[in-house]
Image (spheres, rainbow, N blue to C red):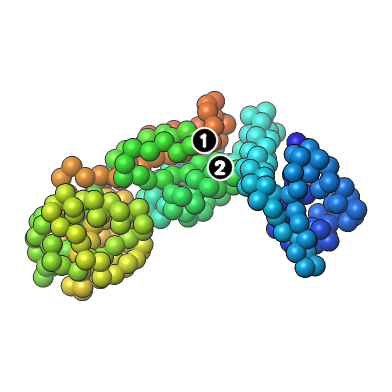
Amino acid sequence: MDTTRLRVLLAVAREGSVTAAAEALHYAQPSVSHHLARLEAEVGVPLLQRAGRGVRLTDAGELLVARAEEILGRIDSARAEVAAHAGLRAGRIRLAAFPSALATLVPAAMTVLLRDHPDLDLALVEAEPPAALRALRAGDVDVALIFAHEETDPAGVTVHPLFTEPVYLVTGADNRGDTLADHADARWIAGCERCRAHLFATCARAGFAPAIAFETEDYIAAQALTAAGLGVTTLPGLALSAHRRSDVLITRIPQDGRRVLAATYGRPPLAPPVAAFLDAVTSGPDRPAWPA
């Protein structure tokens, strides 16, 4: 399939009409219609249908748009990687990372990276693992820092294990107890969907189901609620390395941990800037020290 026609289809999907897509692409409207007709002929099925004054995607059109975003993103990334490898530019790193990694791992790694490669172009975005992996597959980022509570092998990407961070029980000064079971009747503070699923599984092994009273993905807010005596929670080591309140008690949960991984698209060899970042994040001098 012609990549120009794929870009035209994406523009129509974004803009909602052939006219608006033509304006966005600075094409003549007949040229856009021609590209769409040729693309439909190539795939053999209708991709668009009329919807009032605009158009909407057919089921086949939606499928192709999803793939086109990934295909074109990878083409753009490949061009940038070849240019970097050939020395035509200093190179770039576009990174997506979850919040506690951005607050701990990333600054240390980027400091090392820029020390050795001062002309490197950096771009950072905060994203939880599902969004980070979508951005990676679409070519919007070069590396995704993600976490997983279980073994994982995301489709279409290469995973580079970094370490396993411990998980801690976090309680207030007036709500003591060193084990999960000590707080079976407490109000619980839960985080994101993946963390919540892990919390339920961990508590189930301790013989109870936690009663969720508060929901927040903000590890600072979770500690504030805990310190106020409003509930108990669990937090991973990176979150507590990034910010630890002095008025909460933490107890490491035995045999519990969260895997921290770097994900890249496709298979090696990696583009030089990506390889340099992975080296910095795995060998940097300021790896997090877990709370005692």
Q: Is residue 68 above or below residue 282?
A: below
Asked if residue 157 lies left or right of residue 16, the reply is left
| Neighbourhood count class around disc 1 (C-alpha, 10 Å): few under 14, some 14–19, many 20 upward | few
**Which one is nearer the viewer's eye here, 67 or 163?**
67
Q: Residue at x 48, y 37 (%)?
A: 155
Callout count = 2
Asked if residue 64 lies left or right of residue 115, the reply is right
**Amino acid marked by disc 1:** Gly
**Sequence order check, earlier mark of 2 and 1:** 2
Q: Which residue is drawn at 41% across and 45% down?
A: 146
Q: Which residue lies furthest to the front in this view?
A: 45
Q: What element carries label 2?
A: helix
Residue 47: horizontal and vertical position, in percent? 74, 49
Residue 202: horizontal and vertical position, in percent? 21, 51
**Which one is nearer the viewer's eye here, 192 or 171?**
192
Residue 151: horizontal and vertical position, in percent? 33, 37
- Asked if one can make out residue 65 in the rendered structure from this viewpoint, the answer is no
Q: Residue furthest top?
A: 269
Residues tagged 2 and 1 counted as in contact (Cβ below 8 A): yes
Residue on which the image places disc 2: 137
Asked if residue 123 lies left or right of residue 71, the reply is left
Q: In this view, does 215 lie above or below 269?
A: below
Check residue 36 in the rendering and tell me which mark sits there, or answer none: none
Asked if residue 84 lies left or right of residue 107, the reply is right
How far is the residue under mark 2 from the one under mark 1? Answer: 8 Å
Residue on which the image places disc 1: 156
**Which one is nearer the viewer's eye here, 14 or 110?**
14
